[in-house]
Image (spheres, coloured by chain):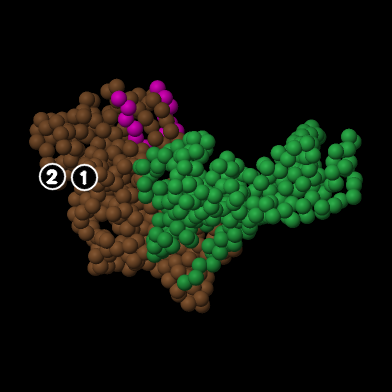
Chain colours: A brown, B green
Amino acid sequence: MANIQCAGIVKSYGAHPVIEGLNLQIPDHEFVVFLGPSGCGKSTMLRMIAGLEEVTAGRITIGGTDVTHLHPGQRGVAMVFQSYALYPHMTVADNITFGLRRAGVAKAEIDRRLADVARMLGLDPLLDRKPKNMSGGQQQRVAMARAMIKTPKVFLFDEPLSNLDAKLREKLRTEIRKMHNTLQTTTIFVTHDQLEAMTIADRIVLMRAGQIEQQGTPDEIFDRPATRFVADFIGSPSMNFRLGRIENGAAVAGSVRIPLPSGRFSVSDGQEVELGLRPSRMGLVAEGTAGAIRGTVVLVENMGAEGQVIAEVDGAEMSFVTRHFRDLSPGDTASFALAPEHLHIFDRATGRSCLI
Amino acid sequence: MVSLILRNMARAALGLVVLVALTPILWTTLGAFKQLRDIVTPIPKLFFTPTLENFATILGNPTIRDGLVNSVIVVAVAVGIGAALGIPAAHTLARHARRYGDDVQFFVLSLRFMPPVAIAIPFIVIYLDLGIYDSLGGLILVYLVTTISTVIWLAVPAFDRVPREIEEAAAMEGCTEAEVFWRFSLPIAAPSLFGALVFTFVLVWNELLLALTLAAQNATLPVVAASITSLGKEVPWGVINAATVVLVLPPLVFIGLLMGLINTMVRGGGRAKG
């Protein structure tokens, strides 16, 4: 187990820079998720830590050792790939133990460790099979077993669940998190799925165009997004945005007028801003309540316990989540409101949050 | 019920196709064991007294025996060197020079565009000057152009199909590039590479024109076989049939051996030694 430090990491392909001067500290035992849209450099960053991609400039240290130019096999890291990357010409048992056999670990020790990981991941009945005769979920378990048996200092996961169906994805996600709770091995997990990131991470590193946009706990990222980009990326259904301005201590956008709690935002009167209203922080209110937003219901999406209501306000759609969605149908007029302490305000020019 | 009939009809059609394809080969094999009078009879005979005389003639004939030995040596060395140089080259092209890969592949293929006749005459002159005319070494040298280029051309896609992540996963376990190639890329691509080698083998085993022009005393089997068919009126059909069987057998044996090798290789991949 070890901490990871990335200092001034630059990666470019030819003249085209993908990552520019990235700095990151990951303390021991932490479960960090690299999150971002495709092409943001999160996988490249992971592959550089793994040693599969060369670093153009900068330093990577794992557990105090400078690994920047070390061969992937000497870094003490283990990786799980999106495509599982099992060795098709070997049985499951041979797949899992290949690294140990290669390193010349004693047979008895290998057998003991194989039994351990196989029991942990429920692979006992599969050990003699070839990978191609197994389901995606089973294959990914084998890949995890292959990573675990080496007892690495760091686990790297490169979108390991993206090829699985939704139900299995959820199940394996829980298993990965439980495994981390038991082993406490420093882990980096790359995904583009914000829900996956929110549920599994100790800390999320949200990346955009080769730079860290924001890093923090899932709560911090969700409740205090530093930029409009983060606010838009995190949360489902995604945040409503309205162009507006600050007038007399309230944020105003068309018919929407939300009084600002004092001391929460650093804004000045007349400032051009963008309001962010999270659907999950909104709800139905009685007709005529102060600060209520009135809109015509366009669509009601049933999500089981809750429903997402999409309403037209000032000619644009705005959505909110309510448990009483069954009382609404398209064409109705609805009154709903945002709890003022959950309002987000972003500077229109820089996109940065005006939260203090 | 309908599907059952359809399936049986499909089987019958398939059987017919196989029969049509195999009949000439079977007939040739039968002919190899017939005496001449059983062959030239107006009514084809299915039952006859078999004789090994034709094979005795073939294998007793020093020209044909030498031709067989020459063919085996030339083709084995040419395909062997072609594989030893071509397969690693193809892996490197597929993995490290993908940018140039297509160009190189096209260049390699373009070597095969040229009709062999076009190079045969210049080669005679060059070989005479170099003193390697009518030598097995000279024939091997010219066949290497065919084998190396064909192996590369067919092996690059075979390695392209090996998922890069598998090689990366192996690297993560500490394997060097050579180890990754031997233990992972090669066994995983082996079934496709097998096809490439067989194709290359057949290509040079049946090669006639260059062998005819570049060798005189040290002729290969196709050259010898061709000379038998131009013996004049008294065509020794039985001998020709036996020669055909002898010509066809080595490729079959070679394919069998190669398949066995690949099977052990694929299985052996799991038995990594520490």
Task: Give percent across and percent down for residue B237.
Answer: 79, 42
Q: Is residue A318 magenta?
A: yes
* A48 or A247, nearer to the observer: A48
Q: Amino acid at mark 2?
A: Gly
Residue annotated with mark 1 = A226
Helix, strand or loop at label 2? It is loop
Quarter-of-image position of residue A336: top left
- Label drawn at residue A336: none
- Residue nearest the viewer, comparing B6 with A40: B6
Residue A197 or residue B256, whichever sits in front? B256
Report the residue at 48% width, 66% height from top.
Answer: A98
Say whether residue A322 is visible. Answer: no
- Mark 1 nearby-residue class (10 Å; few <14, some 14–19, many ≥20): many
Identify whether A78 is placed above or below B237. below
Residue A263's disc number: 2
- In the image, the segment drawn in magenta is A316-331
Foreground pick, A283 / A303: A303
- x 25%, y 40%: residue: A229
Vertical side of A150 occupied by A202: above or below: above
Is tag 2's residue or tag 1's residue first in the polypeptide sequence? 1
**Residue drawn at (63%, 56%), measured in percent from left and top?**
B69
Where disc 1 sits, the SS reads loop
Q: Nearer the viewer, mark 2 or mark 1?
A: 1
Is A33 a magenta residue?
no
CA separation in Å, label 2 and label 1: 17 Å
Q: How many marks?
A: 2
